[in-house]
Image (cartoon, rainbow, N blue to C red):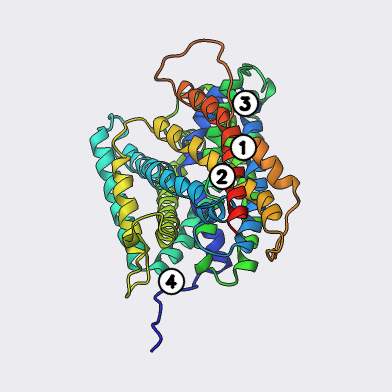
Amino acid sequence: MVEERVKMRKQLGLLEGVAIILGIIFGSGIFISPKEVVEKTGSVWGALVVWAMCGVLATLGALSYAELGTTLAQSGGDYHYINEAYGPLPAFLYLWDANLVFVPSTNAIMALTFANNILQPIFPNCSIDPVCRKLIAAATICLLTFVNAYDVRLTTRAQNVFMFTKLAALLAVVGGGLAWVAAGGVEHFEDGWAGTRTSLSDWSVAFYSGIFSYSGWSYLNFMTEELREPFVNLPRAIYVSLPLVTGAYVLTNAAYLAVLGPARVRASDAIALDFAAAALGALRWAMPALVALAVLGGLSVHVMTSSRMSFAGARNGHLPALLAHVHVGRLSPLPSLVFLMLMSLLMLIPDNLTTLITYCTVVEAFFTTLSCSAVLWLRHKRPDLARPIRTRRRAPARSCCCARPRTGTTDAAPSLGDASVKRGCGFPLLTRHLKSIQKFLYNISLYERLSI
C-alpha cells in the first residue's frame, strides 16, 4: 500500500500572484517611510531620487528572483536559494534570523500601523495609549493567523480585494496631488534641492527606509509550490508588479511633498491622513479606512507567505519537525502560522517603530544580497541546471553592489538612541565580515567537492 503524502494545493494564478506581491509591498511602508526619507535627504528632489533608485534596485533584485524561482521551483524563497547555493549552514542562519528578527518585526510594524490608522480618526484630539494600540495590533495578528489557517483560498480571494483597495488609496493620493499641482501648488518644487544633506550616513538611512517600503517583492517565491504554472506566472507577476509599484511610489511621494511640503512631511505621524485633510476635501473621511485596509491586506499576505518559509525550513530539518506539519482538513501549515504569530506578538513589546524597522531592514537586506549573489554562484557551481528564465549577469551583480551594507560618518554626533547610529554601527560590522563570509563559503564549496 502506497502512503499518500499530504501537501498544499496548487491554487494560485497570475492575479493572485500579483495580489500577493502588491499586497506585501503596498503595506505600511509607504505610510511610514516618507517621513524618514525626507528627514534624512533634507530636500524634495533628494527624497524623490531615493524613491526612484529604490525602485530600480528592487527591479534588479526581482529579475534575479525570477531566475531563481523558476530554476529552483520549491517553496521557501530566500531560504531555499541560499541552501541550494551555499549549503545548509548559511540557510540555517538565514532561517533563524528571519523567524526571530525581520519577519515578526514586519508583522508587528504592520499591525501597529493598522492600529494607529483606526484609532486616530476615532480619537482625533487625544493621545493614543500605547497599550491600547498594542492590544489592537495583537488582536489583529491573531485574527489574521486564524483566517490564514482556516482557508487559504479565502485568504487569496481577500487579497484580490485588498489589492484594489490599496490601489484606490494610492490613486486617491496621486489624484489629489495632481489636482493640487494643476491648481498652481508647485512652490515646494521650485527650489527642490534646497537643504539637501551631504552626509553619507544620512543618505544610507534614507535609502534603507525606502527599501523597507519596497520589501516584499520576493515573497511570492515562498509559495512557488502552490502556484499554478510557476514557470509562467511567477515571472509575469514580478514583471507586472515592480514597474507599477515604482511608478506609484514616486507619484505618491511627489503628491505628499507637493501638498504638505517637506517640513510638514517630517512632522507628520500619519502622513496619508494629513494629506487627505489638506487636499481631498469631503473624501478625507474615506482615507483612514483605505489606509487601514491597505495595511491589513499587507499584514495578511505577509502572515501567509512567511509561514511557508518556516514550513520549508522544518521540512529540511533546520527547525523543529512539528513546523513541517500540514493541517489535514485545511491543508494549511498550521504549526508554522502559530509559531510566527507568537514571535510577532513578542515584537510588539518595543515602543518605537523606527527601532523595529532598524532591526529588520539591515538583516533582511544582507540576506537578500546573498540570495541575489546565488544567481551568479549557481551558474558557476551548477551550470547544468535547467533555467527557464536566464537574466543578464548585470542585474544580480548590480543588485549585490547596490544592496550591500553601507556605512558613513555623520557631521554631528547624535545621541546613542538615534536610529542612524544603530544602523551605522551595523554597517561596518557587516562590511568587516563580508570577506570572512566569502572565504567561509568558498571553504564550504571546497569541502563539498572533496566529499564527492
Residues tagged 4 and 2 counted as in contact (Cβ below 8 A):
no
Separation (CA) of disc 3 from disc 4: 47 Å
Separation (CA) of disc 1 from disc 2: 8 Å
Query: Mark 1 is on which residue type?
Result: Ala
List x then y, in percent, for residue 24.
Answer: 49, 51
Judging depth in this view, the residue of 68 and 220 nearest the camera is 68
- In the drawing, does residue 133 fall left or right of residue 86? left
Per the image, label 4 sits on a secondary structure element best described as: loop
List x then y, in percent, for residue 246.
Answer: 63, 44
Going from N to C along the chain, the mark reached first, 4 or 1, is 4
- In the drawing, does residue 115 fall left or right of residue 75? left
| 334 versus 206 height, above or below | below
Going from N to C along the chain, the mark reached first, 3 or 2, is 3
Foreground: disc 3 or disc 4: 4
- In the drawing, does residue 48 fall left or right of residue 149? right
| 317 versus 2 height, above or below | above
Label ID, residue 403: 1
> Measuring 59% from the left and 20% from the top, which residue is drawn there?
408
**Quarter placement of the N terminus:** bottom left
Query: Mark 2 is on which residue type?
Result: Thr
